[in-house]
Amino acid sequence: MKRKVTLKQIARELDVSISTVSKALRNSAEISDDTKQKVQAFAKLYNYRPNNIALSLKNRKTNTIGIIIPEIVHHFFSKVIRGVELVANKRGYNVIVGLSNESFSKEVINMEMLANGSIDGFILSISKETLQQQDYHHFNETMSQGMPIVMFDRVIPEINCDKVIVDDFKGAKNAVKKLVDQQCKNIAIITTKDYVSVGKLRTQGYLEALEEGGITPKAKLILKLEDTFNFEEHLDVLEKEIEQLFKSNKKIDGVFAVNELYALTAMKVARKLGFKIPEDIQVIGFTDGVLSKHATPALTTVSQHAQQMGETAANLLIDKLEKDFNEEEEEQFQTVVIETSLVERESTK
Amino acid sequence: MKRKVTLKQIARELDVSISTVSKALRNSAEISDDTKQKVQAFAKLYNYRPNNIALSLKNRKTNTIGIIIPEIVHHFFSKVIRGVELVANKRGYNVIVGLSNESFSKEVINMEMLANGSIDGFILSISKETLQQQDYHHFNETMSQGMPIVMFDRVIPEINCDKVIVDDFKGAKNAVKKLVDQQCKNIAIITTKDYVSVGKLRTQGYLEALEEGGITPKAKLILKLEDTFNFEEHLDVLEKEIEQLFKSNKKIDGVFAVNELYALTAMKVARKLGFKIPEDIQVIGFTDGVLSKHATPALTTVSQHAQQMGETAANLLIDKLEKDFNEEEEEQFQTVVIETSLVERESTK
DNA sequence: GACTGTTGCGAAAACGTTTTCGTGTTAAAA
DNA sequence: TTTTAACACGAAAACGTTTTCGCAACAGTC
């Protein structure tokens, strides 16, 4: 087991100084061709590679970006990571992943763990618990120490940083508009409580689409679910909630759900109750997931272009990291809005 | 924007030496209580945290582990990551993710990028291209430099390292046995070409289950697909292949598919051809995915316990990293086999 | 022969830590 | 008073780089 070879070892072997080795390897004009050849040959033979950690320390730059997400077993988030990794790698960066597991304290711990020199900047999506508690000190502290943050999807208006979001309002509005155009008269929405910003925005989109379609929204048709509850593990609870919705509103002919699971479950319940999709009830979901594509019938959804979000976030962050800080002209933050698109499949006419 | 405070700055402010600050913060007995208090108070005020990079350099230990996977937008792999992250975090490690995208060269590049000091060890699953080319020099080189590797799922017998695998053979055999027990007489398998080790093993399990059930395997019922082809993007091709299988074998009454996509598509095609599931044809998949659970009918699958694989791999790696290397008693490698379990849902009787 | 310029290389600092060892001061023991 | 021991702290090395600067040796110019 041979240890990794260092400049010092090469220097000792060849009886030159460390500086000479370093310069020879970087092809400095200071070094004679003879010496260069000797050193380079030796380095190649022993497969020398500069130690990243030493470089990071010297350059005060790790070329690594941290991404903190609430959950990784989730199509949306894993696609975002893919996007981040893609551009990060292309631009010479590594990606270090932290999972908050939707918990405030894990989010804080993860960020503190990485903020002490391990990375150059963050890309993150805020955990539900943090959103609820509205405690954002860790974001502000991190930024005040000169570490840039790019937030995506779940963001907070009050925080000053780059953001990549989807036009939740417009996406939802278009989806519901589609239902209205298809002659749906009683369109229900299955959404989350309002503290989840995306849920709130999508609900607003729903309301506006209805109004523009000349339909008066009815409170009975709006099902707001507690999003902290883990429905994936307790599908039956979700089913009951939705069944209740259908049973007390027999005339529902359209459903807009703010995520994949809600939409799928809605279809399942509807089918159980004897409705045909899309003949009796049309359903649209909101997601970037794989379930929709393979569902029966395949689910029409609002696509969020998760990978593109990841790519955009990574580019934003790296741009900021590599920007020349001589130009001290008041730091500017951007919010990039990714357009959603409606992927029409079989659950709508 | 205040820079992160360092020992040196604290030392200068308080007019003591760097050593004293360092010792005071670690509560060394060498330092007087007075000085300790002074230093600790100051450090707290300025929110001092030791720089991880400097520590890594000093300790020649990064407390970071690298995980290289072929694809992240994939339930199995993201669950593995979750498992890895869980125990890594618990044991004080960070996780850095590299995606090979099933490509040999990206796998090599990613590993080289991380092997130069950025991490302490690897957890990885081999890309398809690497498996095909059978070029494993990068694994051997990495290990010969003293960096441990733990492989999971897609492994190579010839390589000496810790491994975490699923009992593909047994899992497949049990699944097919279940079909046999359910009186299926013409059981087809949809699998991959043999260079994918897991595909091969699962096929063997299928064969043995048939033989034990007194059924003679028929070549016509074995569909081996080229796994490098991206079926997720070209579902129609996959459908045609499977449709061909059904059409030339009208008496098929059971299907065992080595992954989720194949199984789901088989169900879809079968339904299209007028078969009822599970009445006419029973289907079992192999996976840890989410599609199976939400399919209609819900798919019976062999669960791989992906998260557990990740946890096991992480523990194996960290154990090795933290093992006292004084005991030079011939390094031992383990292969941990995770038991699969059959999750029975609606696609079987 | 004295100056200038070029070439080729090494010493040392710096990045931020931890840790070993040395040392000056003071108090206790002889 | 002298010796010893305890105490409190600082200097310096080390981890592996890069880079600035200084300097010796030599060649060329006047």
Image (cartoon, coloured by chain):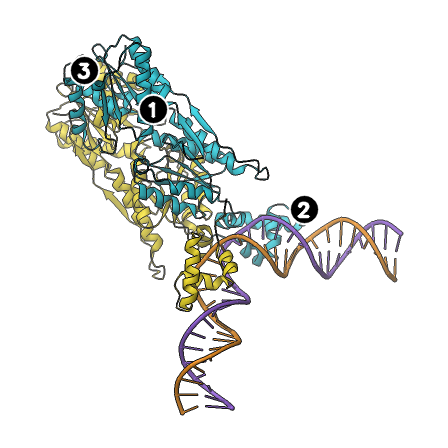
Chain colours: A yellow, B cyan, C purple, D orange
The quarter holding residue A345 reads: top left
Say which element carries label 3: loop
Alpha carbon distance from label 3 to label 2:
76 Å
Q: Pick the residue in front: B337 or B215.
A: B215
N-terminal of the two: label 2 or label 1?
2
Say which element carries label 1: helix
Q: How many residues crowd around disc 2 within 10 Å: few (fewer than 14), some, or many (20 or more)?
A: few
Chain of residue at mark 3: A
Judging by the rendered image, the residue that carries numbered circle 3 is: A250
Judging by the rendered image, the residue that carries numbered circle 1 is: B201
Q: Residue at the spot x=34%, y=47% of the render?
A: A161
Q: Please identify, in this view, whether the residue under mark 3 or under mark 2 is nearer the observer.
A: 2
Q: Residue at the spot x=35%, y=46% of the render?
A: B109
User: What is the three-letter code of the residue carrying label 1?
Assistant: Leu
Q: Position of residue B304 (x, y in %)?
A: 37, 24
Would residue B57 appear left or right of B342 to someone viewing this image?
Answer: right
Task: Answer above or below: position of D14 versus A132.
Answer: below
User: What is the three-letter code of the residue carrying label 3?
Assistant: Lys
Chain of residue at mark 2: B
Task: Answer above or below: position of D24 versus B294.
Answer: below
Task: Answer above or below: position of B162 versus B254.
Answer: below
Would residue D25 appear left or right of B33 to someone viewing this image?
Answer: left
How many numbered callouts?
Answer: 3
Alpha carbon distance from label 2 to label 1:
61 Å
Q: Position of residue B273 (x, y in %)?
A: 14, 17
Judging by the rendered image, the residue that carries numbered circle 2 is: B29
